[in-house]
Image (cartoon, helix red, strand yellow):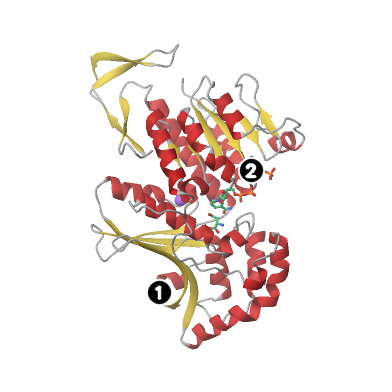
Amino acid sequence: MSKVNLAIVGAGLVGGDFIDQVASYNTRNPSTPLNVISISKSRTALLSQDFAPISLTNWRDALASATTAAPSPAELAQWLSTSPLPVILVDNTSSPDMADAYPLFASKKIHIATPNKKAFSSSNELFQKIQAAAKESGALIYHEASVGAGLPVISTLNDLVATGDRVTKIEGIFSGTLSYIFNEWSPSAGPGTAAFSDVVRVAKEKGYTEPDPRDDLNGLDVARKLTILARLSGLEIESPTSFPVHSLIPSALESATSGDEFLAGLPAHDSEIAQLRTDAESKGQVIRFVGSIDVASKSVAVKLAAFEKSHPFASLKGSDNIISFYTERYGASPLIVQGAGAGAAVTAMGVLADCLKIAGRVLSTLHPNTHLEVLNPGCVYVTVHPVRFADTLDTNSGLKRPSSRLCTA
Ligand SMILES: NC(=O)C1=CN([C@@H]2O[C@H](COP(=O)(O)OP(=O)(O)OC[C@H]3O[C@@H](n4cnc5c(N)ncnc54)[C@H](OP(=O)(O)O)[C@@H]3O)[C@@H](O)[C@H]2O)C=CC1
Ligand SMILES: N[C@@H](CC=O)C(=O)O
Ligand code: NA
């Protein structure tokens, strides 16, 4: 057995690119393909019969004409628990209902790869339940793309923590949307001339924003990312609204009933925010939207701040994120991760890389010279070590059997 089944939920910007990347991966790796057994949107789905792989040729047309109702998370979990192969749920939605069902999926040993921040950044209770269910069943849960899209942010933090380094502070620009908006609106190269509302509209057109751009502009998306990183650094964060978060939503637009209504009303507020830019420029500074976690004082904050043009945050390009990890080992010279932090292709890449890591680790349990060790029993991150005594693989059942043969690896 060298395959896993993938159940994909969400086929929008990120999900669509993800499916295309899986199709391309399977073409390049025909002997070890990722078997896609379902693709669902909010209302309809393509579901495999008997877990046979779905053809990804023309999947968009097939999904557009599908009439099968999308299964509820509980129905999906029930079906996937009968999969003859290990199965990965790929949640490419931003749905809180999906996030709420992670404990159920994990309890059935359904592995999860996702860019959806909700499960790890909502209530601490949900976060704890997911960890407990994963620990109990051995389900692996990877969510690299939930912070900084495909950039290695979560894996870097986990490596720092797992190797015994002490993280003291994390700070940076965590929103691709807000990075793009402020890099364009308050450029380090010269005086900014663009209207704030125009730049927001282009950010949405480029696919950087959340499905509803207010989720970026209200600071909540950054707050969710900080919540995830703070929790992985060992801080107990009750929710993403339990610390100060700056919102860029004008108070008069707080009651807008849709993202489109909000965007239509935004130009009327361009001059309010332009004053901030004028003030910063008069001091030779630029405005950036930043997040910080101070581990020692347990303080987390999302804020607008002015930076000298020589500061690394001032010279970012496009939708780049920049994240600085200050730790005991790195001393005064922080470990910095920088690059595109939003967009369909780089986000889907992060999700696919997580699927490959899960597949590699799940399948390596079935191979003779490696085994899995859960580093932190409350945590879902694992590493692979060589073992001295090999297990033999029963190729019919796919189960490991202990063997007394000494492994030479
Ligand atoms: N865009 C980016 O740069 C980044 C995005 N992310 C995250 O990736 C995720 C996806 O974002 P994006 O692709 O932009 O969003 P989209 O709105 O483009 O796509 C969302 C998809 O999810 C489906 N969906 C929504 N709710 C449900 C549900 N309850 N059950 C089944 N399907 C559902 C939608 O179906 P339908 O079409 O029927 O509505 C749609 O196919 C989000 O969590 C986002 O935060 C993370 C990093 C970067
Ligand atoms: N809207 C988010 C997408 C990634 O999480 C962002 O702009 O960073
Ligand atoms: Na990432």
Q: Is residue 16 above or below residue 368?
A: below
Residue 268 at what x, y percent from top left?
Answer: 70, 76
Asked which quadrant contains residue 296, the reply is: bottom left
Nearer to us in this view, 397 or 58: 397
Residue 275 at what x, y percent from top left?
Answer: 57, 83
Q: Residue at x 65, y 36 (%)?
A: 40
Q: Residue at x 54, y 76 (%)?
A: 186
Q: Is residue 318 above or below residue 101?
A: below
Q: Is mark 1 within 8 Å of ligand 2?
A: no
In the image, 164: left or right of 358? left
In the image, 41: left or right of 135? right
- Is residue 111 in view from this perspective? no
Instruction: Mark 2: give few (<14), some (14-19) or many (20+) Cα within 10 Å.
Output: some
Residue 369 at what x, y percent from top left?
Answer: 30, 24
Give the Cα separation between the discs numbered 2 and 1: 37 Å
Instruction: Mark 1: give few (<14), some (14-19) or many (20+) Cα within 10 Å.
Output: few
Asked which quadrant contains residue 25, the reply is: top right
Q: Which residue is mark 1?
A: 311
Q: Which residue is mark 2?
A: 16
Q: Is mark 2 within 8 Å of ligand 1?
A: yes
- Sequence-wise first label, 2 or 1: 2
Q: Residue at x 57, y 45 (%)?
A: 96
In the image, what residue type sits under mark 2?
Answer: Gly
Q: Residue furthest bottom?
A: 282
Q: Secondary structure at mark 2?
A: helix
